[in-house]
């Protein structure tokens, strides 16, 4: 639930007003128009028409196994003696249609004839498809991998492989200012990525409803762009976006494009953002196409820069922030200076507020405030002791002990302007370090003095600016300890990687936390990000995922306490209200094939213990009836749990690390300790050796008599012919290959890497051969708690995601166990989200869909097996 309040004399907008339709303030808008002139999109008499030729390209080494159609437009005015301009269009088929939304050949004909753009050759290239060769298997689209991935792979494909073939014999300029790249949606971010990676090849970008979201990491671009302010790349960028564009598991398209424009403006790029009517389609982009091309090819075209809001309303304290002699007053006790072990060599001042209503026999609520000295100043902006006195006396919040905690300061350094040297490191860093500091050091001291509730719904944490993102991080890391968050002008920006949070929120199982946020259009815009857009993206993500959240917004103000403090008492009433949250979920922005966690998770269903007190659980598998099998490797024994009554029996006394049923009804299993692959008869328990002299970790069994095994130590994937026992190495080079699974149609093999960051996909041929190897799934990495949190850099992620066992559900989702939990991907390799493991202190080794109708996800989590019911159809 996202709620909105309105203040007299202030324009307060709800998140819906900010992110949807046409009610965005001009101060936040680069350009907004209705497009109506359609003449340039119509065939005109007397205008020479260019020629369109078609071709097929299927000889790529960078994108192996892919096949794609393309076409090339050569204008009538082309002279082979004069180098022509070039423009490459992704999703080329849609742009090349002369009766479609874009009608690029017609528009080019008209604009070139009218000398409103130079003589330009257009190349229309479609995304690659990996054709199936196995009977019954489906072709696999490679569009998302090619278009949404960051990095230079697709740029190299265009420049080194494709364009030399497609433009052979044509005289094309090599001047990047005469070469442009264009695309829509994922093709839009692809176009930007090509120019970003290779500005010496392409100097102009045209993006229609660009997917600068978290399909495959595109959310990061605004932060990357801002870091080039001192040396901007020589590219010119036109962005078209629809007011009613998507808001889904990958992000909020209107907010993402506005954030991109703000970053381009800050860094000094020549750019233009045009907001049109419409949603995620080419209709309005097509109507705007002639104007977009005129601007793009006009060497004198200027940016539409947006001025920063200048209004700063006069601050007055909220009535509940004024001392009232008729209510009991709590006490504020300054505590002895604290020396931390988790933040060594630091000291900090802190204080505790105790309400007059506190009784030691009744556990009190708790709220921790960062930048505590400012927050407790009864003559400053926040005046929290006064606010708490008034609200507690009136019953608007429970008796609450407040901890006012200053950031740490390196005691070996002199203070500069009374600032704490460790503030940015402690507050802006992601991960659980600061949370551990609170839980292991500060709160035990508070609890030694006062009776504090351990119920997370009675424990809150808050702050402003960097203190706000710190508060959110604490609750995000430990929702079992903090169930409420207060954030004012939160620094969800790239100070130390906090700009990742909106993306994480949308792709992580919702956590039981209530979040209040406040920000204004006049907040800061600098090298680390745009605070207004960052907070709007954050609020949009929380709203989409169904969090109990509220976002108060106002025009003007600045990066200070004026607006937040004026709303603080109302925020506390909302945050501490007794009303229970009933999430309203809106997945209308999900396109066909988008498999959001919201459609997978079932409200009220969580992890349940299936078996515990095991030695070490692994090798989960299922038969067609839904009976669940696993191995306790230390017993050793293979067990079966009956789907009907939950009874457990021993199938075989073997220790195995991976099992799967074959089409013959036998269980095939890995015995790396004995260098062999075996079969187990589930009825008799008899064991036969299938292959020797292998070191298998996990396996997948085809429907035509092959077994693929991962040999982790040898860094190879090996194929075994069940009938002949022939062993063949079919792939090498994956960093410690581990989990392995076949798609439902058997045409794709997926292999996770324990020592890296990917899950790889292969095409499976009828003879068991593999090709078309691509790192199609990016595994989310955990933060390295011992890593260095650098300023204006991403967090120090671990080198490996520890990808492990895998499974596939009826909808084709891939479930990959990892250090972070179960990572879920759609059939094309786009991440749907992460399900945190129930016991993070034990290794998560594998998973399988089993139980009634195979709608339960079972996981082996160290000495325990859990399961949870999902909507897998």
Image: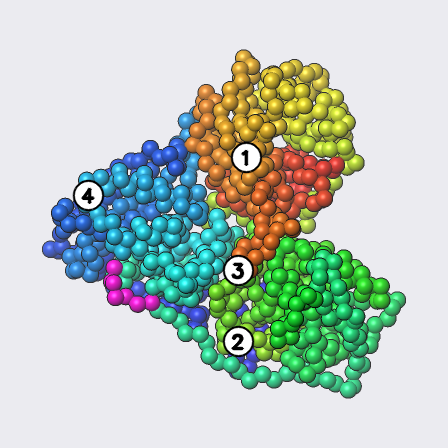
In the rendered structure, does residue 68 fall within the stretch colored magenta? no
Read off the residue under disc 4.
170
Separation of marks 3 and 2 at Cα, in angstroms: 22 Å
Residue 491 visible in the snapshot: yes
* Image depth: mark 3 or mark 2 in front: 3
Q: Classify mark 2: helix, strand or loop.
A: loop
Q: Tell me the crowding category of disc 1: few under 14, some 14 to 19, or many 20 or more residues within 10 angstroms, Cα based.
A: some
Label 4, label 3: how far apart the Cα atoms are? 45 Å
The front one of 503 and 547 is: 503
Neighbourhood count class around disc 3 (C-alpha, 10 Å): few under 14, some 14–19, many 20 upward: some
Decide which of tag 4 and tag 3 comes sooner along the chain.
Answer: 4
Percent position (x, y) of residue 726? 53, 15
| Residue indicated by mark 1 | 735
Mark 4 Cα within 10 Å, few/some/many (few <14, many 20+)?
A: some
Q: Residue furthest top?
A: 724
Is residue 521 found left or right of 584 in the rendered image? left
Q: Mark 1 or mark 2: which comes first in sequence?
A: 2
Measure the alpha-carbon separation of dots 4 and 2. 55 Å
Q: Is residue 205 left or right of residue 734?
A: left
| Residue sitting at x 53%, y 82% | 313
Quadrant in which the N terminus appears: bottom right
The residue identified by callout 2 is 558
Instruction: Provide the residue span drawn in magenta.
Output: 297-303
- Compare marks 1 and 4 and give the one earlier in the sequence: 4
Q: Dots 1 and 3: beta carbons under 8 Å?
A: no
Of labels 1 and 3, earlier in sequence is 1
On the image, numbered disc 3 is attached to which residue?
Answer: 792
Q: Most prominent secondary structure in the magenta stretch?
A: loop
- Give me the residue at 73% from left, 29% from top: 632
């Amino acid at each position: 639930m996202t709620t909105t309040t309105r203040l007299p004399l202030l324009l307060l907008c709800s998140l819906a007003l900010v992110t949807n339709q046409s009610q965005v303030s001009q101060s936040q808008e680069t350009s907004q128009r209705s497009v109506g002139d359609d003449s340039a999109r119509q065939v005109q008499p007397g205008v020479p028409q260019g020629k369109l030729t078609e071709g097929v390209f299927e000889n790529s080494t960078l994108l192996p196994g892919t096949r794609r159609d393309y076409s090339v437009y050569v204008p009538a005015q082309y002279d082979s003696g004069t180098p022509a301009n070039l423009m490459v269009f992704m999703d080329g088929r849609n742009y090349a249609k002369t009766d479609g939304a874009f009608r690029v050949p017609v528009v080019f004909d008209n604009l070139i004839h009218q000398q409103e753009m130079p003589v330009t050759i257009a190349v229309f290239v479609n995304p690659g498809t990996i054709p199936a060769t196995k009977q019954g298997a489906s072709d696999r689209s490679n569009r998302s991998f090619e278009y949404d991935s960051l990095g230079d792979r697709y740029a190299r494909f265009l420049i080194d492989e494709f364009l030399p073939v497609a433009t052979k014999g044509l005289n094309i300029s090599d001047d990047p200012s005469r070469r442009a790249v264009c695309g829509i949606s994922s093709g839009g971010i692809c176009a930007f990525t090509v120019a970003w990676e290779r500005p010496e090849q392409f100097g102009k970008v045209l993006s229609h409803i660009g997917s600068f979201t978290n399909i495959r990491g595109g959310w990061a671009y605004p932060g990357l762009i801002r870091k080039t302010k001192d040396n901007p790349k020589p590219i010119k960028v036109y962005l078209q976006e629809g007011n009613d564009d998507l808001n889904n598991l990958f992000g909020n398209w209107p907010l993402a494009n506005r954030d991109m424009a703000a970053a381009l403006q800050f860094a000094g790029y020549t750019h233009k953002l045009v907001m049109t009517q419409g949603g995620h389609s080419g209709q309005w982009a097509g109507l705007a196409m002639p104007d977009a091309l005129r601007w793009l090819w006009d060497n004198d075209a200027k940016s539409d820069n947006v001025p920063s809001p200048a209004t700063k309303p006069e601050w007055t304290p909220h009535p509940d922030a004024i001392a009232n002699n008729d209510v009991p007053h709590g006490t504020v006790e300054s505590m002895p200076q604290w020396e931390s072990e988790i933040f060594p060599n630091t000291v900090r001042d802190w204080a505790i507020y105790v309400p007059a209503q506190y009784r030691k026999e009744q556990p009190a609520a708790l709220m921790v405030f960062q930048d505590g000295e400012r927050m407790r100043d009864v003559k400053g902006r926040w005046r929290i002791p006064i606010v708490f006195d008034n609200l507690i006396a009136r019953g608007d919040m429970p008796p609450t002990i407040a901890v006012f905690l200053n950031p740490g300061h390196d005691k070996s350094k002199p203070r500069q302007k009374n600032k704490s040297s460790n503030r940015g490191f402690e507050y802006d860093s992601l991960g659980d370090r600061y949370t551990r500091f609170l839980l292991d050091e500060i709160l035990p001291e508070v609890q030694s003095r006062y009776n504090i509730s351990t119920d997370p719904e009675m424990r809150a944490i808050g702050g402003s600016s960097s203190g706000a993102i710190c508060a959110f991080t604490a609750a995000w890391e430990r929702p079992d300890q903090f169930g409420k968050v207060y954030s004012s002008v939160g620094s969800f920006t790239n100070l130390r990687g906090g700009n990742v949070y909106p993306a994480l929120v949308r792709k992580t199982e919702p956590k039981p936390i209530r979040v209040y946020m406040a920000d204004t259009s006049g907040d800061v815009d600098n090298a680390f990000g745009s605070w207004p857009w960052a907070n709007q993206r954050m609020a949009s993500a929380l709203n989409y995922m169904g969090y109990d959240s509220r976002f108060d917004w106002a025009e003007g103000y600045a990066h200070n306490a004026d607006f937040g403090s004026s709303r603080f008492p109302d925020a506390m009433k909302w945050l501490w209200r007794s009303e229970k949250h009933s999430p309203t979920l809106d997945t209308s922005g999900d396109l066909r094939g988008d498999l959001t966690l919201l459609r997978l998770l079932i409200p009220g269903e969580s992890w349940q213990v299936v078996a515990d007190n095991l030695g070490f659980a692994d090798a989960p598998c299922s038969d067609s009836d839904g009976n669940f099998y696993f191995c306790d490797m230390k017993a050793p024994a293979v067990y079966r749990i009956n789907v009907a009554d939950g009874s457990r029996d021993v199938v075989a006394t073997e220790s195995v690390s991976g099992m799967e049923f074959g089409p013959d009804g036998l269980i095939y299993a890995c015995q790396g300790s004995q260098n062999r692959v075996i079969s187990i008869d589930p009825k008799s328990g008899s064991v036969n050796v299938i292959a020797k002299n292998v070191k298998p970790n996990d396996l997948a069994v085809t429907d035509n008599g092959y077994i693929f095994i991962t040999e982790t130590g040898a860094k190879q994937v090996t194929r075994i012919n069940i009938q002949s026992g022939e062993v063949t190495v079919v792939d090498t080079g994956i960093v410690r290959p581990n989990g392995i699974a076949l798609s439902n149609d058997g045409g794709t093999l997926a292999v996770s890497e324990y020592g890296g960051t990917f899950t790889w996909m292969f095409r499976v041929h009828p003879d068991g051969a593999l090709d078309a190897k691509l790192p199609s799934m990016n595994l989310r990495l955990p933060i390295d708690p011992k890593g260095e949190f650098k300023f204006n850099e991403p967090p120090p992620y671990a080198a490996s995601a520890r990808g492990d066992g895998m499974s596939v559900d009826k909808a084709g989702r891939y479930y990959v166990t990892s250090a972070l939990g179960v990572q879920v991907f759609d059939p094309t390799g786009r991440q749907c989200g992460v399900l945190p493991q129930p016991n993070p202190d034990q290794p998560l080794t594998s998973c399988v869909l089993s139980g009634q109708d195979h709608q339960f996800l079972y996981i082996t989590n160290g000495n325990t097996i859990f399961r949870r019911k999902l909507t897998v159809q």
